[in-house]
Image: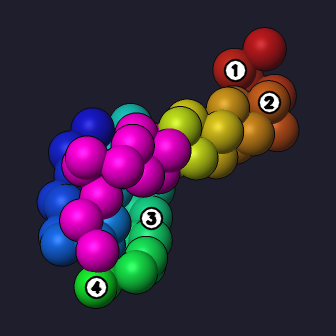
């Protein structure tokens, strides 16, 4: 997995093993690292990946 992180929590995630690209937008007027917001976005991506794997009959 690779990701690009922009100011305020603008995120681009690439997960080649799942053929997945995810873009998230956030509040560009405030920093995201100090507030824990960036970690919350990573957690959201983990939920998305978990849901995709749960729906994949080959992953069971």
Residue under pointer 4: 29
What is the CA distance from the residue labelled 4 to the residue labelled 3? 21 Å
The quadrant in which residue 30 appears is: bottom left
Percent across and percent down for residue 33 are 24, 49
Q: Position of residue 1 (x, y in %)?
A: 27, 38
**Disc 2 residue crowd, few under 14, some 14–19, many 20+, Cα 10 Å:** few
In primary-sequence order, the first of circles 3 and 1 is 3
**In this rendering, which labeled residue sits more in front, label 2 or label 1?**
2
38 part of magenta stretch: yes
Q: Earlier in the sequence, mark 4 or mark 3?
A: 3
Q: Earlier in the sequence, mark 3 or mark 2?
A: 3
| Label 4 element class | loop
Q: Which residue is mark 1?
A: 59
Q: Which mark is residue 22?
A: 3
Residue stretch rendered in magenta on the structure: 30-42
Instruction: Classify the position of the C terminus by image quarter.
Output: top right
In the depicted view, which residue is nearer to us: 27 or 22?
27
Mark toward the viewer: 4 or 3: 4
**33 and 22: which is toward the camera:** 33
Label disc, if present, on residue 54 of the rendered structure = 2
Helix, strand or loop at disc 1?
Answer: helix
């Amino acid at each position: 997995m690779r990701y690009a992180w922009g100011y305020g929590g603008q995120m681009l995630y690439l997960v080649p093993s799942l053929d997945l690209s995810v873009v998230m937008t956030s509040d560009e007027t405030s920093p995201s690292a100090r507030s824990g917001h960036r970690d919350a976005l990573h957690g959201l991506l983990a939920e998305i990946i978990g849901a995709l794997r749960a729906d994949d009959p080959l992953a069971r």
